Amino acid sequence: MIVCIAEKPSVAKDIARIIGATAAHDGYMEGNGYQVTWTFGHLCCLKEPNDYSENWKHWSLAALPMIPRRFGIKLIEDAGIKKQFAIIERLMQAADGIINCGDAGQEGELIQRWVMQRANATCPVKRLWISSMTDEAIREGFGRLKDQNEYQSLYLAGLSRAIGDWLLGMNATRLYTLKYGQNRQVLSIGRVQTPTLALIVNRQKEIDGFKPEPYWILATIYRDTQFTATKGKFLSKEDGEKAFEAIAGKPFAVTEVQKKKGTETPPHLYDLTSLQVDCNKKFSYSADMTLKLIQSLYEKKLTTYPRVDTQYLSDDIYPKCPAILKGLDDYASLTQPIIGKKLRKDKKVFDTSKVTDHHAIIPTGVPARGLTDMEKNVYELVALRFISVFYPDCKFSTTTVMGTVDEVEFKVGGKEILDPGWHAVYAKEEQKADEEDAKSGDEERTLPSFAVGETGPHTPTLTERWTTPPKYYTEATLLRAMETAGKFVEDEELRAALKENGIGRPSSRAGIIETLFKRRYIRRERKNLLATPTGIELIDTIHEKLLTSCELTGIWEKKLRDIEYKTYDPQQFVNELKEQIGNIVNDVLSDNSNRRVAITTEADLRKKSPRRQAPRLKADDTIIGKPCPKCGKGTVIKGKAAYGCSNWKNGCDFRLPFEEKA
């Protein structure tokens, strides 16, 4: 009998149906020479400190660092897990062979290997490796099973990651909690969560320390068109007024009219992070919610494997695309223009060299039925993106007009769409955006016709604006920062490692952000992510700055990737980490200060947060009615103790506090 083990009951039942194991039993399906069983994600985990030593049962600084001689695994304490494992163990010990049907990735490999080890399975093991749960993909996968030994390095990389996270998390968390936590809150430290928290804290400090400064923009209105001085902004009002006076009353002359035609290619397909970013921007879904929704769509066979970090498809997917497009019957009006024709094949979409374990997230072509509204939103993003990559490029024309007034140079630009191309797929969405832009006066400009040499009167303006602080992270921008964390690292080799991996894996980033919320290190204020006093003080307290930097993850990711590629020894990775943990413990224990980290309670989080104050200025009513220095769309209005923007209903949060004149 061949035992197949999947990661979820729903996945196991789909596999069982395809291979003919249709007889239902408690905890497994059977038939046609197969028994198909399942886990519930992780059934096993690394042993906890108290499983290794009596000394480690109680939290004590004297017991640190905790470094087991040999790491072991155990069943997770749960009655349902123990019952299912007993079934798996019985099936595996009587099996002639096993097929590992876990999710095709590092985590999926680790989950099933641990179960097989715990069950003392000794029979040969094959590996099913698929990126989609459609019937066709399952049949194809069973037709090309591979020996599990081919994935040994993948397992070792996953095991090394788990051991590394245990060593750092268990030791550093106990260390900082006991030393600085006031015995009231666990101060959780982690390889990914701590640098992520540091990103939020550092951005917040930039904002808190920001001092707005005025500057002046010189522009002029010629033939109802605003031209802006190319010199840019003036840092003093005197310089701006001097330039203003130099051009006042003198004619405007058009010196150059440049027209260029250009093209814009369709956007990349989705990987998990870019999908989470768009869902946060468009629907305000958290990263964790988006992951749950796209996972649900995958299990319903509507989309391909979601936990991916590539935006490309392998070349062998191209012949399957016409059938996928035909299956998108809810989008027939969009697929009709391209079905039956030779589909576009762009290197930006199809590139086997950019695909490792899995390809980008795309629809499977199975008709989407019975979805919740939230699932529909996510599915539509994936479907429209897939359709758009087969549409032609958008063609447009840009016009740049240059002019001068008494040797002061001015410039204006405009854009005209000649052929929407792939933008036709997003016509409804873009129409709404255009309507919003029209309301706010920010719509795309189509310039009147200008001729070189023409001259005429104009109306110059000198506008005062204020520099603005960087924006708080939202989940969308934080995900991007985690993905592109290499830009925060100076070492070129580590930057390259982070370029490929970022902070954390795509599948883990949502969980990391949720952990920061649960630990009360961060909180939400509308869409913005703000650090709590606990989060700020924890980052300020950490001695080993490598723990708060993106470099630590860069070092790990490079070594783990090398382990997967068989160019680095897993044991060396663990040994180096053990030494590093010892140094971190000694450094903190030698701290003789009496520092303590503030504790943020649930009651603190429920309090209405005070508005963050910019430096207070003397009231200066001359700025009332001038263009908003932040959005440029509204005008400055005066409140009781601060200036604001008349465009506040549309989201502009410009605020400049002042002190009333005596």
Image (cartoon, rainbow, N blue to C red):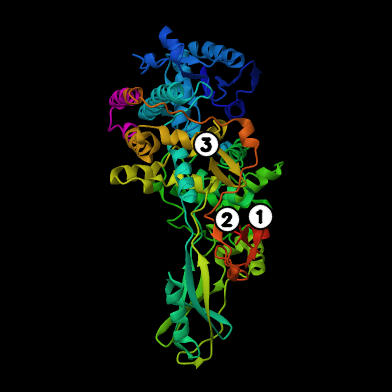
Task: Give whichever of 273, 366 is nearer the camera.
Answer: 273
Residue 569 sits inside the magenta stretch: yes
Mark yes or no: residue 557 visible.
Answer: yes
Q: Which residue is mark 2?
A: 387
Q: Which residue is mark 3?
A: 533
Identity, as a three-letter code, of the amino acid under mark 3 = Pro
- Identify the mark nearer the N-term, 3 or 1: 1
Identity, as a three-letter code, of the amino acid under mark 2 = Ile
Q: Which residues are magenta?
A: 562-585
What is the C-alpha distance between the residues marked 1 and 2? 9 Å
The residue located at (48%, 71%) in the rendering is 216
Q: Are marks 1 and 2 in contact (CB under 8 Å)?
A: yes
Q: Residue furthest front?
A: 662
- Identify the mark nearer the N-term, 1 or 2: 1
Q: Are marks 3 and 1 in contact (CB under 8 Å)?
A: no
Q: Position of residue 403 (x, y in %)?
A: 45, 84
